[in-house]
Amino acid sequence: MADTAKLFPENLVTYKVLGEPDGPHYAHYDLVGGRLAVEQVYPCITEFLSHHDSA
């Protein structure tokens, strides 16, 4: 993800690195259905949506 983010101007991209440097990492499905998703991923998604919801 960090390599992809480098392709865009800094003011147009925001990303969050999840997981631990020497611990488990996330594959695509893990972000939705992984064992730690409820604790580590869902709060980030909820915070993002709450911050960016215009309705």
Image (cartoon, helix red, strand yellow):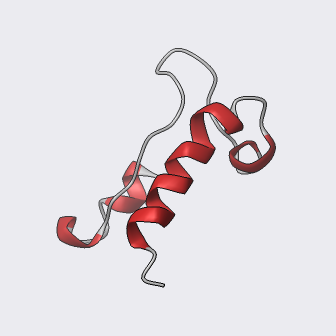
Q: Which residue is drawn at 46% across and 63% down?
A: 50
Viewer-nearest residue: 29 or 47: 47
Determine whether, in the image, residue 33 is placed left or right of residue 2.
right
Residue found at x 74% / y 50%: 32
Residue 30: image quadrant is top right
Tell me residue 40's x, y (percent): 58, 34
Residue closest to the eye, 51 or 16: 51
Does 50 sit above or below residue 22?
below
Which residue is farthest top? 22
Question: Would residue 8 appear left or right of 48 to someone viewing this image?
Answer: left
Give the number of marks.
Answer: 0
Dividing the picture into quadrants, the one containing residue 48 is bottom left
Q: Is residue 37 above or below residue 8?
A: above
For image coordinates 42% across by 82% down, the residue present is: 54
Q: Where is residue 11 in the image (x, y as percent from the top left)?
A: 18, 69
Residue 6 vertical position relative to residue 33 in the rendered view, above or below: below
Residue drawn at (60%, 42%) of the image? 41
Rendering coords of residue 4 (x, y %): 41, 60
In this rendering, the answer to whether 4 lies above or below 19 is: below
Outermost bottom residue: 55
| Image side of residue 23 versus residue 2, left or right | right
Of residue 46 and residue 18, the one placed in the foreground of this image is 46
Q: Where is residue 15 in the image (x, y as percent from the top left)?
A: 39, 54
- Nearer to us in this view, 54 or 16: 54
